[in-house]
Image (cartoon, helix red, strand yellow):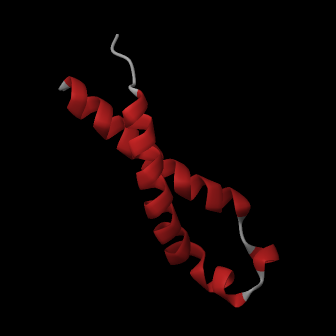
Amino acid sequence: MKKIQKWMVVNALKIAFVVGIALNFINQGDVLLSGNLHKVNILKLCLTFCVPFGVSLYSSYKAQYNLK
């Protein structure tokens, strides 16, 4: 079985950071900008970063090893 490389994880973290911020402002921007931070859904905020991380890591892995 082929291993996940360190550069794949680093790249996925960078993408998750940028895309996660954008998605959080799309999904919860009104709450974040209103100053009512106690109303922010923390689970939703965290999961919004996990999705682009997973997609990016999977895509890098698949592209690197030409999996079908």
Q: Position of residue 61 (x, y in %)?
A: 31, 30
Figure quadrant of the N terminus: top left
Q: Position of residue 52 (x, y in %)?
A: 43, 51
Count up the numbered dots. 0
**Residue nearest the observer in this picture, 67 or 7:** 7
Residue placed farthest to the bottom in the image?
Answer: 34
- Work out whether 40 lies above or below 62: below
**Residue nearest the observer in this picture, 48 or 17:** 17
Residue placed farthest to the right in the image?
Answer: 38
- Work out whether 60 lies above or below 18: above
- Quadrant of the image occupied by residue 63: top left
Figure quadrant of the C terminus: top left
**Residue at horizontal 52 percent and vertical 67 percent from the top:** 21
Q: Position of residue 20 (x, y in %)?
A: 50, 61
Horizontal side, residue 8 vs residue 31: left or right: left
- Work out whether 20 lies above or below 1: below
**Residue at horizontal 54 percent and vertical 76 percent from the top:** 25
**Residue at horizontal 66 percent and vertical 80 percent from the top:** 32
**Res 9 seen here:** yes
Q: Position of residue 37 (x, y in %)?
A: 77, 77
Horizontal side, residue 22 vs residue 40: left or right: left
**Residue at horizontal 44 percent and vertical 36 percent from the top:** 9
**Res 67 seen here:** no
Horizontal side, residue 28 vs residue 6: left or right: right
- Work out whether 15 lies above or below 35: above
**Residue nearest the observer in this picture, 58 or 7:** 7
